[in-house]
Image: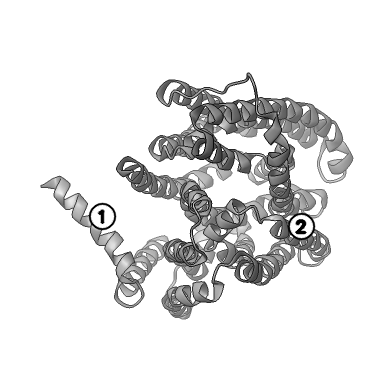
Amino acid sequence: MTQKKSQLKIGIILNYVNMILGNLIPIFYTPIMLALLGQSEYGLYKLASSVTSYLSLISLGLGSAITRYLIKSREEEGKEAEERIFGLFDVIFNVIAVAALAVGSILITCLPLWYAESLTATELSRMQLLVLMMVINMALSFSESPYLSVVNAHEKFIFLQCMNILATCGGPCLSLVALLLGTGSVGMTTAAMAVTILSRIAYQIYVRKRMQLRPRVKNLPMNKLKEIMGFSFWIFVANVVGQLYNATDTVMIGMVPALATTGVAIYNVGGTFNGIMFSLTTGISGLLAPKTNKMVFQGASNEELTDLAIRIGRLQGYIMVLVISGFLAFGQPFIRFYAGEEYSEAYWVAVFMMIPNMIPLVQSICLNVVVAQNRHRFRSLVYLGIAILNVIGTWFLMHVMGIIGAALMTGVALVIGQGFVMNWYYHKKTGLDMIRFWKKLANIYIIPALMCAATLLLSKVVNFYRLPVLLAGIVIYTILYCLLNWRFTMNDYEKGLVLGRLKKRRSRKE
């Protein structure tokens, strides 16, 4: 038990290391990448990535089921049963990988039907090559999924996060080398494939040699396939929704001749900051997914699950609100230095995405509970309805307000679905006390709201468009945020986490 706790604690620390690196590296890497790649080719690269991402739906939501059924089999039947489930998923995902290659080939031939009017012949040819390479990379990722889930299910978080850190650093480094060699977006895609291949090899060696687990392909538990598919179907629906939210805007923007690759480039720069929000929170909730599953399987009360959601929600909230309020205060001058004057609209794209996403991201444990309870059908149906509304609304607003209209409609849909409907469901149907949840989280928003408003007023007299002034402002803002929250907002548990970590560091030095 002590070893598992150590794995979790070190895993969380490494997750934050990965999170910091994942957020700092793009700050230095992206401006260089944009300069070497150019706005048009960057937009083409992101458009190809968005189109290819639809192939992730071929997994039918089974990726979210692996960890759950590995843990369930081990807890109820032992190691041999777990290895059979492992074998079943290994076979399934290899079939899915082959299916991705087949469907991807069809997708490539369809690209001229969608983008012949908005892309030049050269751009279209380059996009087809990029999609082909990305399809191969996705197929490799599918075949890796069962091994990654085994590591996660056994809570081997140190290895898991070390691999994540290597991928976080290795991908941009290899991409930068490729760009400096003049290979452009094709080189960047090749670099991503190299990282996936190396990761696949490392996970397989670790699981088979270190963990002594192998997928058993004899006597596969086919009797459980129906149950697994039933569980995964609503995850699949949720994944469809995720694609409609995360990729469809880009795909539709690329179809509009007036926007095309330039619009895609600006929209994705704004989306980068929204991606930072996800990286700040989903890492911790992912680490705690096995614990949440165990609590549900062992009959934890709704009060205990609500307490867990509050503890994790507040910890995630401190970091998330710092980033969002800081971006609201300093985002416009930051984007000018980060990407250039031509990307100024990315500020509003980011704002309209980041603020609504605060709602589901501080509630990520609630989603883990719903999935563990196998009650995610309603969530998937609600999200599907809202996502369809978002696609329709985005298409019309995009022609009126451009890329800002696309971001605004996405934000409105998130508030309706994630904010109102799902909080009602968590409270009434799942048993989580969401009124108590939001009461406990409310005070973490007060200080950043006041600080953000004060900084925006200060920007009327202070020129944050000078880089030294901007950097000084961000540093002062961060220090004040930490000090004020320590004095007025943090509770004893949260202060204890910080003090406990500092005491351990001191004892190690002594």
Position in image of residue 296 (x %, y %)? 52, 54
Left or right? Give the position of 332 relative to 428.
Answer: left
**Disc 1 residue type?**
Arg
* Front-most of residues 31 and 141: 141
Point 58% across, 29% down: residue: 86
Q: Secondary structure at mark 1?
A: helix
**Disc 2 residue type?**
Leu
Would you name the residue on which mark 2 appears? Answer: 384
The answer to whether residue 181 is seen in the rendering is no
Q: Quick one: quadrant of the N terminus?
A: top left
Would you name the residue on which mark 1 appears? Answer: 501
Q: Secondary structure at mark 2?
A: helix
Residue 97 quadrant: top right
83 w.r.t. 167: above or below: above
Position in image of residue 198 (x %, y %)? 51, 25
Most distant residue in the left direction: 510
Q: CA distance from mark 2 to mark 1?
A: 43 Å
Residue 140 badge = none
The answer to whether residue 434 is seen in the rendering is yes
* Front-most of residues 278 and 334: 278
339 w.r.t. 445: above or below: above
Counting residues from the N terminus, which is met first, the one under dot 2 or under dot 1?
A: 2
101 w.r.t. 318: above or below: above
